[in-house]
Amino acid sequence: MGSEQGHALETILVVDDESGIRQSVRGVLADEGYRVLEAEDGRGALRLIESERPHLVILDIWMPEMDGIELLRHIRDSDPTTPVIVISGHGNIETAVTATKLGAFDFIEKPFSLDGLLHVVDRALESHPDAVGDDATDTLAADLTVPIANHPWIQRTIRRSVVANGQGLHSGIRTGLILQPLPAGSGIVFGSISASATIPARIEYVDSTGYATTLFHDGIVARTVEHLLAALHGYRITNLLVKMQGEIPIFDGSASEFCALIESAGIEDQGGAVDEIVIDRRYEIGDRDGGGEYLAIEPADAFGVHYVLQYPEPVGRQEFTFHFGDTEDFKREIAPARTFGFLREIEALEKMGLASGGRLHNCILIGENGVVNTPLRFPDEFVRHKILDIFGDFYLLGRPLRGFITARMTGHSDNVALLKVLRERFELQ
């Protein structure tokens, strides 16, 4: 329980046409020491907002006369700095995206846990809506070019919530995501807009690695997380809530749009060091000299990857080495590389229930004579995308790695296998 004296000056307005919901929320907030106001419709809420100036508004989407989205617009027009938490019993990703674009701090699906609501309330009241000022871009640009090897990792999140929607590569359904800042020490966490349960972005929650990395925990699934995680790794984001609905959007098949999304949110250094996992010797899986799949990591001054890809023509052999010098290097050399697939595999993938969202604009399609749908961004774009996947998967230890990876014809399952070796060796919990 919180301190009544600590929250005595903080007023929260609860807007819901269901008296039972209002009473439940009022009870838990009052127990925490907040001053609680109630309104059963939008017009009553607007009157209270004008007269009482609450520090936070919690409002329901589905209400008579004036729904929550319309009320949210009125609140934003009259007082854009007041945080608003939107709740709904009939939510979907489109509603959540709409509410967040209009400035809602968070979107919670009914039935919600009261403890979960309190957590969101605490974050909302600690938020600073005017944190992104005119100098945000300059601050971000300076952060992006600091050499990684010469600068310890520190706790980092985004400055404000941002949203995006698109299509799931494997589910084929329209989906989206909301990125929200989290306090230092929270880690990267995936959550659903329709449940209060969350999935830490950790190796122990990897559920499958067939053509993508999928996390599962407590009834919640997060599919195709690797490109977003790669961008978070590249920008050194350590604390973030990712609210989504089943699968992360594929966008154009690369990490570039995730990079743009992070930059639009701005970056906030939170202070406090993040302990790197420093590789102390060589760890490997596969046969180093056999010519097949092989993956190893060994000591180095910073994170880096050397990848060898060997397919029959028209792809052939591609080889690339990337040293993670700074975020701009990642953004320029690795993030634009798109996922790729062979036309001959599409039918098999569809029978497996995968690649239902594969379209001409969100992956590179390779036919018998070469790429059939798009110009390549790099002559060696395929091998660079493999390094992008490694950047994402190797952020699943919950801490940054200092070591150099050597990979040959590996995929998500190999990445996860080596990560499990490292987790056991370094006793990561």
Image (tube, rainbow, N blue to C red):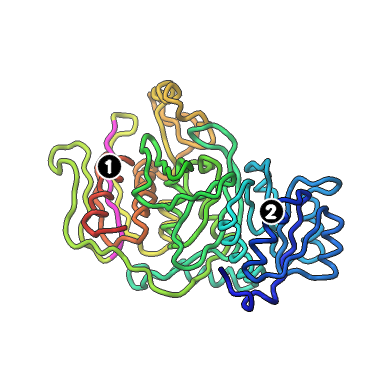
In the picture provided, is 207 more to the left or to the right than 240?
left
Q: Is residue 117 magenta?
A: no
Q: Which residue is mark 2?
A: 86
Q: Characterize the local packing of mark 2: few (<14), some (14-19) or many (20 or more) Cα atoms within 10 angstroms.
A: many
Q: Which mark is residue 101?
A: none
**Tags 2 and 1 touching, CB below 8 Å:** no
> Which region of the structure is painted magenta?
302-311
Q: Is residue 323 above or below residue 17?
A: below
Disc 2 marks a residue whose amino acid type is Val
Task: Report the quarter where the C terminus lies.
Answer: bottom left
Return the residue found at the far bottom: 5
Task: Report the quarter where the N terminus lies.
Answer: bottom right
Name the magenta segment's main secondary structure: strand
Q: Which residue is mark 1?
A: 414
Residue 133 is situated, as x and y percent measured from the top left of the image, at 64, 72
Element class at badge 1: helix
In the picture provided, is 201 more to the left or to the right than 298?
right
Q: Is residue 303 magenta?
A: yes
